[in-house]
Amino acid sequence: MNIRISNEIVAKLVSRLDAAGITNGKEAERIERILELMAESSSITSLDDLIARMRSEPQASENALELAQRLGVVGCMDGPADLATNPCHLDGFGE
């Protein structure tokens, strides 16, 4: 099932999640989690209920690649794309 949410609603949801300290994951992932919680429970009656439930969930931590991408350090240096393609880069390897 595809659900379309306007950019305005996305911005409001993300703003509320950020204000509540729920910052892990990309915007789409956080909104998808809201929709999953709504589908799972009929006892959730407001966004505040959803946020409380999301706060009680363990926060996934970033892996090293995600952190480096967020900080903008992936691909920021010049150099050969693959050191293994040039045999001179492997001189002495394994000795």
Image: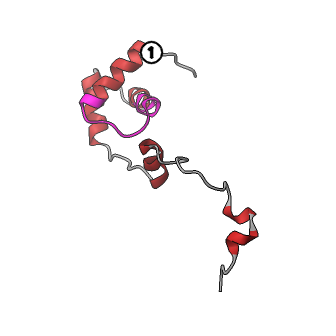
Residue 92 lies, with reference to residue 86, above or below; the image says: below
Residue drawn where x is 42% and y is 28% of the image: 31
Residue 88 lies, with reference to residue 66, above or below; the image says: below
| Image x and y of residue 75, in percent | 55, 47
Query: Magenta segment, which residues?
Result: 18-33
Q: Quadrant of residue 79?
A: bottom right
Residue 3 lies, with reference to residue 68, above or below; the image says: above
Q: Quadrant of residue 9?
A: top left
| Image x and y of residue 33, in percent | 42, 33
Is 84 displayed left or right of 2 in the figure?
right
Tell me, yes or no, whether the highlighted magenta stretch contains residue 26: yes
Give the structural element (helix, strand or loop) at label 1.
helix
Residue wearing tag 1: 7
User: Is 32 in front, or is 79?
Assistant: 79
| Image x and y of residue 46, in percent | 28, 21
User: Is 41 in front, or is 55?
Assistant: 55
Residue drawn where x is 35% and y is 25% of the image: 14
Q: Amino acid at mark 1?
A: Asn
Residue drawn where x is 48% and y is 45% of the image: 69
Residue 89 lies, with reference to residue 46, above or below; the image says: below
Give the colour scheme shown.
Answer: secondary structure
Q: Quadrant of the N terminus?
A: top right
